[in-house]
Image (cartoon, helix red, strand yellow):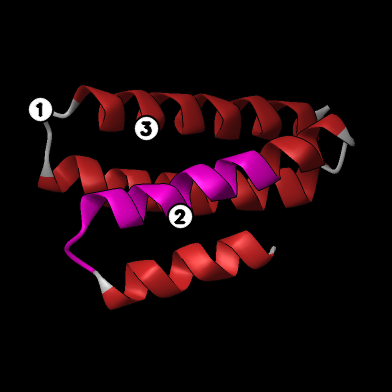
């Protein structure tokens, strides 16, 4: 959680810095992955959704960036996976 707070502060201080914004997204995904491995599906979903919201903004700003496209695809797939598991 401390690292996420640091990443958030850096992202707020540098709103046009893609790397700072991506770091927040990646960290949300990592935290969500921990929740997923512990079968804490609502928490995992929330984390991936937060990452996805950032990914969507970053891809809109730089649609040719392959790394950002991959982040978007990954987080989107995890959101759909978890939604599917929650429906069961």
Element marked by disc 2: helix
Which mark is first along the chain, 1 or 3? Answer: 1
User: Do labels 1 and 2 touch, CB within 8 Å?
Assistant: no
Residue 72 image label: 3
Q: State the mark number for residue 87.
A: none
User: Percent from the top left, x then y, of residue 29?
Assistant: 57, 41
Q: Earlier in the sequence, mark 1 or mark 2?
A: 2
Residue 44 sits above or below residue 37 on the image:
below
Q: Residues within 10 Å of mark 1 (few under 14, many from 20)?
A: few
Q: Mark 2 points at which residue?
A: 24
Dot 2 surroundings within 10 Å: few (below 14), some, or many (20 or more)? many
- Tell me the CA gap for discs 3 and 1: 12 Å
Q: Where is residue 39 in the image (x, y as percent from the top left)?
A: 88, 35
Q: Which residue is drawn at 55% across and 48% down?
A: 27
Mark 2 or mark 3: name the one nearer the start of the chain.
Answer: 2
In-front residue for pair 20/61 = 20
Is 47 in the magenta?
no
The residue that label 1 is drawn on is: 64
Determine whether 36 is above or below 20 in the image.
above
**The stretch drawn in magenta includes residue 25:** yes
Of circles 2 and 3, the one toward us is 2
The residue shown at (21%, 40%) is: 59
Question: Residue 73: x, y in percent?
Answer: 39, 24
Q: Check whether the beta carbons of the residues at disc 3 and disc 1 lie within 8 A of each other.
A: no
Q: Whole-Å distance between the Cαs marked 2 and 3?
A: 13 Å
The N terminus - image quarter: bottom right
When the figure is inspected, residue 68 is found, relative to residue 15, above or below; the finding is: above
Locate residue 58, reporting x and y percent: 24, 47
């Amino acid at each position: 959680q401390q690292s996420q707070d640091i990443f958030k502060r850096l992202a707020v201080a540098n709103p046009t810095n893609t790397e700072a914004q991506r770091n927040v997204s990646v960290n949300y995904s990592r935290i969500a992955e921990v929740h997923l491995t512990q079968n804490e599906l609502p928490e995992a979903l929330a984390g991936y959704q937060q990452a996805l919201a950032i990914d969507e903004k970053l891809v809109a700003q730089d649609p040719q960036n392959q790394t950002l496209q991959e982040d978007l695809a990954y987080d989107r797939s995890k959101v759909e996976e978890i939604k599917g598991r929650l429906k069961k």
